[in-house]
Amino acid sequence: MVSRREFLRWSLAGGAAFAGAQSWAQSLPAERSLKFYNTHTGEQLAATYWADGQYLSGELAAIDCLLRDHRSGDVLAIDRRLFDILYALQQRTGARGTYEVISGYRSPATNDLLRRHGDGVARDSLHTHGQAIDIRLTGVALADLHRAALGLRAGGVGYYSNSNFIHLDTGRVRAW
């Protein structure tokens, strides 16, 4: 949990990432690419989602499809800030590996199913709004990935060492 004093200090220091403000994303390189592997469907994708100062709609649609609810097939436009967080995390770790996706978008029906059959699934999960992803990054130890994600201070970060993934979202800065 971030104290008010830390929040103000970070904000005054140019911490626009707290709100996902565009200035944070604009500090990233002019071309941004990510690689994904969906652990449930076996699909792989390498996509340049940003170039020439804008998001690329065709590449974004391909990523959205890969991150769909694998149970229902439902696709939702994923919050584009999530891709910028993934890209910044890749830069911070120095890794050029593939993001192994455990969970991207989840339909409300799938989310309810998971809540009934397991622990730790939020009633109004950010996954159901296209604002969260559960991942690993090849070539990066999970603990190192977790520390790097916390260092970004760009949204929520959950650490699930027993299940071998971290959760990232574009919500408020928090950790569990």
Image: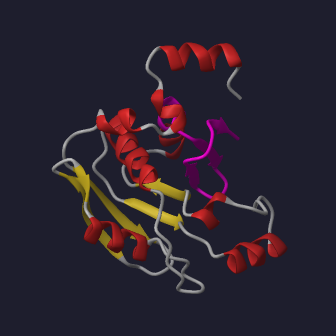
Counting labels gives 0
Using the rendered view, name the quadrant where residue 131 is placed. bottom right
Query: Which span of residues is magenta-colored?
Result: 148-176
Residue at 33% x, 66% y is 60
The location of residue 65, given as percent across then percent down, is 41, 77
Residue at 58% x, 56% y is 164
Instruction: Pick whichever, 63 or 44, lies toward us.
Output: 63
Instruction: Pick whichever, 64 or 139, lies toward us.
Output: 64
Q: How is the image coloured?
A: secondary structure
Residue 160 can be seen in this image: yes
Residue extending farthest to the left is: 52
- Left or right of 136, for residue 155: right
- Please, is residue 75 above or below residue 18 in the view? below
The location of residue 119, given as percent across then percent down, is 81, 62
Q: Is residue 168 within the magenta segment?
A: yes
Using the rendered view, name the quadrant where residue 95 is placed. top left
Residue extending farthest to the bottom is: 72
Q: Is residue 32 within the magenta segment?
A: no
Q: Where the N terminus falls, by quadrant?
A: top right
- Left or right of 32, for residue 44: right
Q: Where the C terminus falls, by quadrant?
A: top right
Residue 147 can be seen in this image: no
Residue at 61% x, 72% y is 106
Using the rendered view, name the quadrant where residue 90 is placed. top left
The location of residue 101, given as percent across then percent down, is 48, 65
- Left or right of 61, for residue 144: right
The location of residue 36, given as percent across then percent down, is 36, 65
- Please, is residue 48 above or below residue 139 in the view? below
Residue at 63% x, 40% y is 172
